Amino acid sequence: MASADIEKSLTVSKDGQQVEEWLELANGCICCSVKDSGVNAIEALMERRGAFDYILLETTGLADPGNIAPLFWVDEGLGSTIYLDGIVTLVDAKNILRSLDETPAQPLEPHVDAHGGPELTTAHLQISHADVVVINKSDLVTSVELEAVKERIQSINALAKVHVTHHSQVPQLEGVLLDLHAYDSVGAAELDFAAKGHSHLDPTISTLSIPVPILSPAQLPVLDEWLRSLLWDSALLAPHLAAVCPAPSTSRASFEMHRLKGRIQLSDGSVKLLQGVREVFEMLDEKDASKGGDAPSGTGLPRPEGKIVLIGRGLDAEAFRSSVYGTLGVQPLG
């Protein structure tokens, strides 16, 4: 296989100084070919300058994080020391509602207009993908206005943790903006909170919660098939109708997925965790199934059902729940 060299420029800040690094990357091996060139460049820089405590990637104000996050969601098999810790969105309390309600000068994506609803703004995209939302400039709004902002944000993304600040002052960095581990854990409490979201407040993007009964290990491949159809083909499997709910004749999907999280309780006592951004998703084993809300052994209490939480555009609750229950062959919950 022919090998090609890539040059990548990175700007590194240290002790208030900015240094630009030019790195030459060999693109011959399969691992380097699969990884994004930006990930390869950061790894090469770490080899030259030593390991970093954190890597903060700051996008421009108009960036769509859903296009960037999968690049840094590196598969363990590729042997990278870099992992996606979380996405943080900074919101201007004074102007965010106006930004959410404005009409974009042009569509952000070719398929956005297919939904027939309000047009998607950059603010919607940034909030819907966030693991943490920081509402800043809270001192410029009244308590009533601040509550309206919080409810609107939670209606778009009920999974995100919301912090209210003024002058960008946070109580601490670790656990608030850093060390989030948003993609290697899914707590039952956060999914329960997401189920209480105000999805009716924003007609553009909403959070949908689907309770899932305890499944057998043999049903996991079926769930995986449902997720692949949902995220890769933008199609809802409908086995009870002997068909698939396809995209319209224009080949544009009738819905758009942005974020996915879930906990699947299995009959053998183990727990599977679901994580997804756009078309990229993982189904992971929970390291300690006793955490996150399971009933303690010996208490005689029933184990809780699992839950899948979806964030996206054009999510019809009845259609999605009917599809997943029909595909798994289980009785509806909730």
Image (spheres, helix red, strand yellow):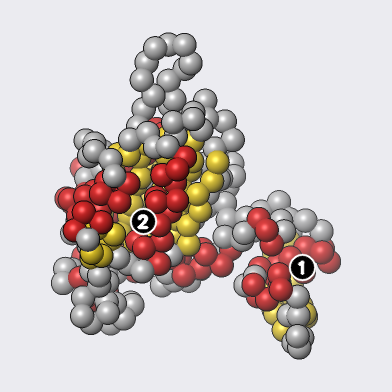
Q: Which of the 4 quarters of the picture holds residue 287? A: top right
Q: Residue at x 71, y 51 (%)?
A: 53
**Does residue 294 show up?**
yes
Mark 2 secondary-structure assignment: helix
Labels 1, 2: front one: 2
Where residue 100 appears, x then y in whole percent? 26, 63
Using the rendered view, name the quadrant where residue 113 is placed.
bottom left
Give the left or right position of residue 193, taking residue 283 as reference: left
Contact (CB < 8 A) between labels 1 and 2?
A: no
Q: Amino acid at mark 2?
A: Trp
**Residue labelled with disc 2:** 226
Location of residue 137 with respect to 13 vertically, above or below: above
For residue 96, above or below residue 190: below
Residue at 16% in and 68% down: 117
Total labels drawn: 2
Front residue of this view, candidates 7 and 287? 287
From the top left corner, tell me how far across and down residue 322 is, in percent.
21, 50
Residue found at x 62% / y 59%: 75
| Disc 1, SS | helix
Q: Residue shown at 58%/56% (left/top)? A: 84
Left or right: residue 74 compared with residue 155: right
**Residue type, mark 1 in image:** Leu
* Residues at marks 1 and 2, CA–CA distance in whole angstroms: 40 Å
Give 211 or 113, whichever is nearer the viewer. Answer: 211
Crowding near pointer 2: few (<14 within 10 Å), some, many (20+)?
many
Q: Position of residue 166 (x, y in %)?
A: 41, 47
User: In the image, is residue 89 above or below residue 8?
Assistant: above
Residue 7 visible in the current orientation: no
Decide which of 94, 125 is in the foreground and name it.
125
User: What residue is pinned by disc 1?
Assistant: 45
Residue 1: name its quadrant.
bottom right
Q: Which mark is on residue 206?
A: none
